Image (cartoon, rainbow, N blue to C red):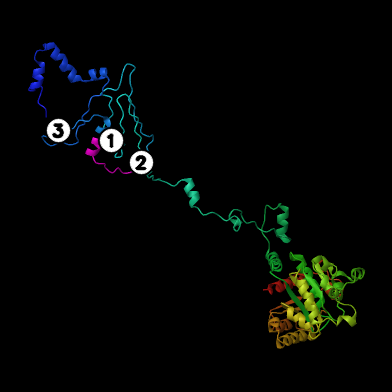
Amino acid sequence: MPDPADHNESATAEDAGQPQPARRRRDLRRAVGALSDAQTGTMPAVTPEPSSTPDAGTPVPRRSSWAEAAAAADHAKPAAHVPAPTRRPAKPPVTAQPQFGAGSAGPSVDSAPAQPDEHNSRTTAVAYDGDTPAPPSSHVPEEAPAFRRVRPTAADAIAESPMPDFISSPGLFVKEQKPRPVGGIRGAIYSLTGGAWNLGPSAKQRDEDELARRISRQLQGSYNTAVLSLKGGIGKTSTTVGVGLTLAEFRGDAPCAIDANPDSGDLVERALGEGIYQQASPRTITDLLKNIESVDSLTALARYMHHAGRLHLIAGEQDPEVSDSLTAEEYLRIRKLISNYYSVALTDCGTGVTHNAMSGILQSADNLVIAAGYAVSGAKRARSTLHWLASHGYEDLARNAIVVITDKDEVSSRVDKDAIEEHLAGICRQLIAVPHDRGVADGDLVTLDVLKPETRRAYKEIAAAIVDGYR
């Protein structure tokens, strides 16, 4: 430490010979220091205070600029790790710049910049001259502060919730509506209240709706059902027409019926009526076979077909000398052509299972309908047909066959109908009985509008059983 002024010999020598008032004014200027520096425009040398007491006898270095003073302070105080704040400050820190008055020529000692903050460990030292004020120091943290949300926001809840499937699950957003009741007391209440009271369909209507669903099931590919019997006059052709019209009523795609009866079949007459068929162009299956190579579209095929509503039919040959000439190969050509445009086909095979086309029919059939009657002879023929099929390599067709018993002749009470049904039901997949109906027994036009409700329901059950067999 330098000696006090009272013991400093140089100061005593300097004071010698000077008046007492002059020495007092000089000491005052040295004590204040700012007045002379402000007038001369020079910055006094600032000696930073050391962070710790230096060793005895070690002189304190003097710095000639702010930058050197700041660097010395940073070197004396090691940087401490500052944890990241948990919340962002409301406003960024503002560093006040020195303000100068109008009459000031430069900064004073009192407006000198403060020492570096002990929490700021990355201060950059830049040297400025005495006339230019120091710019505000901006500190950019190395990493963004971590934030912690106390409760999830609405955006978080939407992002974390599973996205519903609007296509495959529309029922998540629409309430299921009860089906409308048709007929009966439930239907009357629904009509009188304008739909306000909907008791839903009855058990009978639910059964009807289930049959319609089974009949209208979408199919992948083309399927063929053969309707045959060993005895004529027991409802084979009427079953083909009734079931074909039922399929056309409930299915989205039109079915096709082929008359392959070698004995001048009357399939088209039963579907259209004798008078309408005579007025129509008499195109038959023989005409189609002659020009089958030129048929390359449904439009071209329609010229050889007849239409009973949405049921499309191919008429059989009426000339007895030509009708029996249909071979298995010719029938397979017809079947291949039909499979390109129709998903369901019915083939009226006629009587017997040994004629020329029968092997091709059985080869391409997906299931069978065996026509039978309540007469004793009709029941025996149906049983014989199933046994013949099982013994000639068609076990699957016989096992999955549908036996249809039509009460066409209205047999007397001496016949035990229940015993016949029980006997035939054990050797087939399903047995369905068609009640006596004059719209079927007359042997003329078959239309669904004139049939009894029980007969129409029987045809629905047959159609549903046929479609169930398509796998």
Amino acid at pointer 2: Pro
Looking at the picture, how far across and down is residue 424, in whole percent?
72, 83
Residue at the disc numbered 1:
117
Task: State which quadrant residue 376 falls in.
Answer: bottom right
Amino acid at pointer 1: Asp
Please report whichever mark, 2 or 1, sits nearer to the chain's N-terminal start.
1
Answer whether residue 346 is magenta in the image: no
Q: Is residue 101 left or right of residue 175?
A: left
Residue at the disc numbered 2:
141
Residue 352 seen anywhere in this rendered image of the structure: yes
Looking at the picture, how far across and down is residue 147, in whole percent?
39, 44
Residue at the disc numbered 3:
59
> What stretch of residues is rendered in magenta?
70-86
Looking at the picture, how far across and down is residue 95, in whole percent?
34, 30
Residue 435 seen anywhere in this rendered image of the structure: no
Quadrant including the N terminus? top left
Asked which secondary structure carries label 1, the reply is: loop
Answer whether residue 72 is magenta in the image: yes
Task: State which quadrant residue 75 falls in.
Answer: top left
